[in-house]
Amino acid sequence: MPMPSTDHVPRISLSDEAYARIETAILDGALAPTERLRDQDLVDWLGISRTPIRHALDRLAEHGLVEMQRNRYTRVAPFDIAGVRGALEVAGDLWSGAVRRGLPLWHGDDVDSLIESFGLMEATEDDLPTFVRIFEHLVTACVRLEGNPARLRALANVIPHVHRLARMVTVAGTMDSDRLRRFVDDVNAAIRERDAPAAADHIDHYIARLAAAMSTS
């Protein structure tokens, strides 16, 4: 009998599946910093054979989430406050750069969506995990709108480290409601005016304050 086409069904490789599931476990804290990652334990947990798991671990090591010493150990990378701060600064540079170059060309609907997302950031109050999630959304949305593949690839390398911010550190003053409100009001006003340099400067200044305020929890 004729079978329906499955060409439209997205496919994910076993290596990609292993990567995504291990990365999620690292980022949400289920796999703690310095925890050993043994092949057989991962095979039993994921239900995936060793070879794609090793490929996934190699990629996670390239992105700094896993440490490997051949024939000695594979483990979750220790939490590195300086590394997270650096990732935040790079993500901020990518964000402001995308806004500086792309904002004048973005469609009205895209601009309205960004302004709405900034409003959600303002409402996070003391909820740091939600703040980080909205931060990631805004940075990724702006970089995708600009459409620079190199910038998007660079962002993919640093966002996982920024995500660790939500669980591992306290950012003194990050959730200061007055400061956050001023940032959102200022950047939204610049976006409405399509004033790309001003919007990018507001982003740069706010990220600089966050990076300077970071401390271990």
Image (spheres, rainbow, N blue to C red):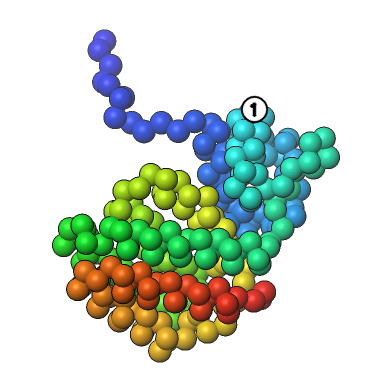
Q: Is residue 36 visible?
A: yes
Location of the C terminus by quadrant is: bottom right
Q: Is residue 123 visible?
A: no
Residue, far bottom: 178
Above or below 94: residue 190: below
Residue, far left: 108
* Horizontal side, residue 71 vs residue 31: left or right: right
| Picture quadrant where residue 145 is located | bottom left
Count neighbours of disc 1 (C-alpha within 10 A) and say few if under 14, some if 14 to 19, many if 20 or more: few
Count of number-bearing discs: 1
Q: Secondary structure at mark 1?
A: helix
Q: Nearer the viewer, residue 197 or 35?
A: 197
**Kind of residue at disc 1:** Thr
In the image, residue 56 lies at what x, y percent? 60, 37
Q: Residue at x 26, y 10 (%)?
A: 1
| Picture quadrant where residue 19 is located | top right
**Residue marked by disc 1:** 51
In the image, residue 13 lies at what x, y percent? 49, 30
In the image, residue 12 lies at what x, y percent? 45, 33
Q: Residue at x 42, y 66 (%)?
A: 135
Above or below 193: residue 72: above
Q: Residue at x 37, y 73 (%)?
A: 201
Residue, far top: 1
Q: Residue at x 27, y 21 (%)?
A: 5
In the image, residue 46 lies at what x, y percent? 61, 38
